Amino acid sequence: MVRKISGKYSNTKIHHLDVSGDEVTDIPDIANSLAQTFSQNSSSQHCTQKFDSYRRQAEYNRLSFKYRNLET
């Protein structure tokens, strides 16, 4: 903030992303590459069978959003 006030502030440049040896430079392509990586990392292919079985069972449980909030 001090640098910005004194006029020494410069915009942060967007860094390029290296995906499998290819340089990704466009913002939408960077976002899509990150989203694809997050999707792959959180897929069931990276889970143990025990965890995947637990996850499937837990997904069948209905969520209850009712609460008793006794705070003032």
Image (cartoon, rainbow, N blue to C red):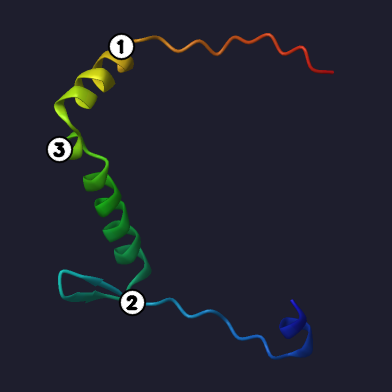
Could you say whether the residue bearing mark 2 is in a helix, strand or loop?
loop
Q: State the residue position of label 1.
A: 60
User: Residue at horizontal 43%, vertical 76%?
Assistant: 14
Of tags 1 and 3, which is closer to the observer? 3
Q: What type is the residue that disc 3 sits on?
A: Gln
Dot placed on the residue nearer the N-terminal end, 2 or 1: 2
Residue 62 vs residue 54, the one in the foreground: 54
Q: With respect to residue 69, does 48 lie above or below?
A: below
The reply, left or right, for residue 15 in relation to residue 38 is right
Q: With respect to residue 46, does 29 lie above or below?
A: below
| Residue 34, image x, y percentages | 31, 58
Q: State the residue position of label 2.
A: 16
Q: Quadrant of the N terminus?
A: bottom right
Could you say whether the residue bearing mark 1 is in a helix, strand or loop?
loop
Q: What type is the residue that disc 2 sits on?
A: His
Residue 69 vs residue 27, the one in the foreground: 69
| Residue 39, image x, y percentages | 26, 45
Circle 1 crowding by C-alpha within 10 Å: few under 14, some 14–19, many from 20: few
Q: With respect to residue 51, does 59 lie above or below?
A: above
Please say if the residues under marks 2 and 1 sit with CB atoms less than 8 Å apart. Answer: no
| Residue 16, image x, y percentages | 33, 77
Q: What type is the residue that disc 1 sits on?
A: Tyr
User: Residue at horizontal 77%, vertical 12%?
Assistant: 70
Distance Cα–Cα, label 2 vs label 3: 28 Å
Residue 51 vs residue 66, the one in the foreground: 51
Distance Cα–Cα, label 1 vs label 3: 20 Å
The reply, left or right, for residue 61 in relation to residue 4 is left
Distance Cα–Cα, label 2 vs label 1: 41 Å
Q: State the residue position of label 3.
A: 45
